[in-house]
Amino acid sequence: MSGALKEVRNRIKSVQSTQQITKAMKMVSAAKLRRAQDAIVQMRPYAQKLQEMLSNIVGNAEGDINLALAKERPVEKVLIIVITSDRGLCGGYNSNLIKLAKLDIHEKYASQFAKGNVAILPIGKRGYEHFLKNRYKVVGDYWNIFSDLSFENVVRASKYALDAFSKGEVDAVDLVYSEFKNAATQKFIAEPFLPVKKTAPKKGNAKADFIFEPGKEVLLEELMPKILNTQLYKAILDANASEHGARMTAMDKATDNAQELLKSLKISYNRARQAAITTELTEIVSGAAALQS
């Protein structure tokens, strides 16, 4: 019986150690989440207004203006930008993103994928390792952006996608990421990044009218890449906040589960100890009775 008691005691110590780790990780993720949430909350209105303006301009542009990044053509080659995290222990966050990226490929680009014309540009170590291991065509130069998250580093990845599209090396670029809602909720999104979507004016609404200085084409050539860089940066900030929220939630649940397991183990330990004491008392009483007889 002493061996069984020792085993339960060891399990209790092990669970207590794990619980301390999950509590610490939850606190670290909560601190990181506050900073990441502030960054995306401040960035989102600016990025949304820029995207709205860009879509309106492209939708109302005259046919004689050549907008390379808004040019639609038959889709033969595709680039998918997949934003995951560098680390795990964040529940189903990474697996859901990878699953969504694969769903996007097989639902929209099955024929291109069959010809080997779909490439993955992963941002985040988890996505990079998964797609590399599963023999996808991977652009492996930008996966470590989260180790030094800055606008300048994001622009490098964005520039690769913009250049590839402008040169005709790819005909469509999709973006797969997680939009931050709150600490417990993330929305997994797969959306077109290039070509730039055109927004047609709604019925009854006046056509958007902009005054351009210098000329429209010159200004758009300069403006469009900068707005698209901002859109990718916004998506990465969303993903960063989502990761910390998912990890905080996962560690909170793990801490609660450890507490429940500790309760169960302590009950088992007390039962085993009581059984051991009862057995010893029975042996003592039996021995005393044998001596008396």
Image (tube, rainbow, N blue to C red):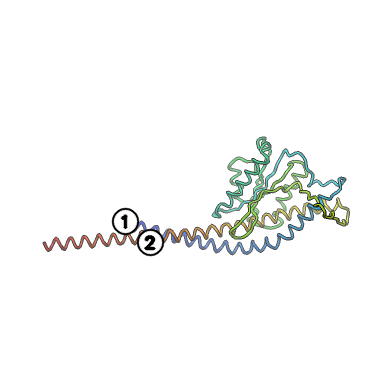
Q: Is residue 76 above or below residue 60?
A: above
Camera-side residue of 204 and 22: 204
Tag of residue 266? 2
| Residue at the extreme top of the image, as rendered | 115
Task: State the image quarter where residue 46 is shown.
Answer: bottom right
At horizontal 71% and vertical 59% (from top left) the residue drawn is 44
Camera-side residue of 86 and 117: 117
Task: Give the percent coordinates (x, y) of residue 39.
Answer: 67, 62
Horizontally, residue 233 falls left or right of residue 270, namely right
For the C terminus, the quadrant is bottom left
Horizontally, residue 266 falls left or right of residue 245, namely left
Q: What residue is disc 1 on?
A: 3
Amino acid type, residue under disc 1 in the picture: Gly
The secondary structure type at the circle numbered 1 is helix
Amino acid type, residue under disc 2 in the picture: Lys
Which one is closest to the eye, mark 2 or mark 1?
A: 2
Task: Give the percent coordinates (x, y) of residue 257.
Answer: 47, 58
Camera-side residue of 244 and 51: 51
Pointer 1 local density, CA inside 10 Å: few below 14, some 14–19, many at least 20: few
Task: Give the percent coordinates (x, y) of residue 36.
Answer: 64, 61
For the N terminus, the quadrant is bottom left
| Residue at the extreme left of the image, as rendered | 293
Pointer 2 local density, CA inside 10 Å: few below 14, some 14–19, many at least 20: some
